Image (spheres, rainbow, N blue to C red):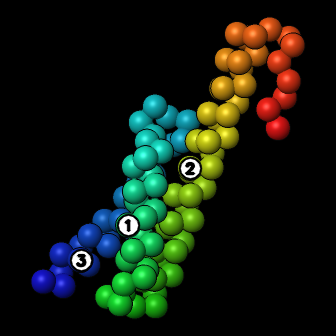
């Protein structure tokens, strides 16, 4: 019964991260993967090396999420400035 967990962990660690610029990127799915990696790290079923690998992979997913949010913010600013004209203030 331990083998399916190892297969699931291996899949999480090797699953390709979609480009945050791509329409295929799903922020919700990315957060789900990060949560699953965190759960694997916190479980007593992973060794030190696996926990470190989960941490590293989680950071890669979080970085992709940050890029997605940055891009979305820029798009939102563009839409707002177009809709409201030059009187819009910087959102920062």
Place residue 51 in its image quadrant: bottom left
Q: Quadrant of the N terminus?
A: bottom left
Q: Quadrant of the C terminus?
A: top right
Q: Residue at x 24, y 73 (%)?
A: 7
Binning the other alpha carbons within 10 Å of mark 1 as few (below 14), some (14 to 19) or many (20 upward) gives some
Please name whichever residue, 16 or 83, is drawn nearer the observer in this view of the structure.
Answer: 83
Query: Which residue is identified by label 1?
Result: 36
Query: Looking at the picture, how far across and down is residue 35, in whole percent?
Result: 43, 64
Binning the other alpha carbons within 10 Å of mark 3 as few (below 14), some (14 to 19) or many (20 upward) gives few
Query: Looking at the picture, how far across and down is residue 55, in whole percent?
Result: 52, 74
Judge left or right: residue 83 versus residue 9: right
- Give above or below for 14 relative to 64: below
Query: Which residue is identified by label 2?
Result: 65
User: Residue lying farthest left?
Assistant: 1
Q: Decide: marks 2, 1 in contact (CB < 8 A)?
A: no
Query: Looking at the picture, how far across and down is residue 44, in whole percent?
Result: 35, 90
Please tell me which of labels 2 and 3 falls first in the chain. Answer: 3
Q: Is residue 14 visible?
A: no
Q: Residue at x 76, y 16 (%)?
A: 81
- Number of marks: 3
Query: Which residue is identified by label 3?
Result: 5
Give the Cα distance between marks 2 and 3. Answer: 25 Å
Please name whichever residue, 9 or 29, is drawn nearer the observer in this view of the structure.
Answer: 29
Please tell me which of labels 1 and 3 falls first in the chain. Answer: 3
């Amino acid at each position: 019964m331990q083998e399916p967990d190892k297969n699931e962990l291996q899949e999480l660690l090797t699953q390709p991260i979609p480009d945050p610029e791509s329409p295929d990127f799903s922020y919700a799915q990315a957060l789900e993967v990060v949560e699953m990696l965190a759960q694997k790290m916190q479980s007593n079923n992973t060794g030190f090396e696996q926990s470190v690998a989960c941490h590293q992979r989680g950071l890669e997913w979080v970085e992709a999420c940050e890029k997605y949010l940055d891009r979305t913010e820029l798009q939102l600013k563009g839409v707002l400035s177009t809709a409201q004209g030059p009187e819009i203030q910087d959102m920062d």
